[in-house]
Amino acid sequence: MKRYKRIVIPLSLTSGSELIVQWAGKVAQLAGSEQVIFVHPMDIGDIPEKAKEKYPWLAAPLGEQAINEMKTLVEESWTGPENTHVGYRAIDRSSQALAVLEVVVETEADLVIVSRENFGHDLAIRLARKAPCSVMVIPKDWPCQLRNILVSVDFSKHCAHAMDIATAFAQAEGLSSIESLHVYDVGRSAHRVTIPQEELLRTTQEYAAQQHREFVDTLDTKGITVNCQEACNLVAPHAVCYEAQELNCDLIVVGCRGKDTVTALLLGSNAEDMLRLSPVPVIAAKAKGSGMQLLEALLAE
């Protein structure tokens, strides 16, 4: 697996940060990553002189202090390859997202790994929308393991990219199979159809299963067996999250639409809901370089 050579990981330096370091090490180990950069996004602002006089420690270089704390945390929790270059940055910006994205652009990162617990939903969604690379979101307390992988597919080229990432992870971890889930529905006007409801549901399910298998058969799955699953549900993110738990998956991979400057920022409502709701880690898989021109304009402001 050679896709994620450069990884950026935001660190809040609060409780639970050690888990994100462990996941970073796990991914770096699987990907054979060359460079991992830990970033502490700061918004220091202007500290009044009177406050510095009363509390002298406020005058100390906070960026240097943050870097030292990150180094200590990584020394205690890092499980990645010894030959991976590990770097540290403390960025002072009014926006945490722009602080992280500044490092992503500077290092030409392939992946961002962010903790939903430490930074909340907002930063994860903003990074997934704007980063010119894939973003992996880790929920609270999910153990650093990889027993099974689920890919959410709708037969688009973006899902083919997600499947490629999932099979690469499975191959690197030594898994023999992964799960592919297609969520379909019969439409909100199905009651108007003249054929019996049971026949409509059966026909729709059979067609969805046929499309699903034909889609998977067109892909190079690297010798990994792909178990095709179909679910009838009007709310796809809920179905995906439910099936991930039922199938003991530790990772969901979902393709994100958009490769050009404008549409690259449109993650897609289903992908965003999964990032918010999923009880297991999610990779929002995006083609590297998506939306780079617009992102560079944002950083220049």
Image (cartoon, rainbow, N blue to C red):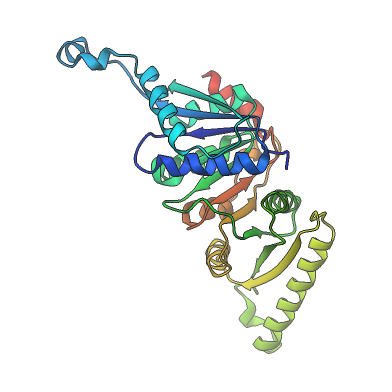
Give the quarter of the image for residue 225: bottom right
Describe residue 151's horizontal placement relative to residue 241 as left or right. right
Q: Is residue 256 above or below residue 34?
A: below
Give the quarter of the image for residue 202: bottom right
Q: Residue at x 69, y 58 (%)?
A: 175
| Residue 110 % position (x, y) | 65, 34
Q: Nearer the viewer, residue 145 or 60?
A: 145
| Residue 125 % position (x, y) | 50, 43
| Residue 223 % position (x, y) | 80, 58
Describe residue 84's horizontal placement relative to residue 77 as left or right. right
Q: Residue at x 46, y 33 (%)?
A: 74
Q: Which residue is drawn at 79% across and 56% down?
A: 221
Name of the residue lying farthest toward the front: 82
Q: How many labels does the image show?
A: 0
Name of the residue lying farthest toward the right: 218
Q: Which of 112 and 18 is in front in this view?
A: 18
Give the quarter of the image for residue 93: top left
Describe residue 254's horizontal placement relative to residue 69 as left or right. right
Q: In this view, does 295 lie above or below 144?
A: above
Q: Is residue 69 above or below residue 145?
A: above
| Residue 227 % position (x, y) | 72, 68
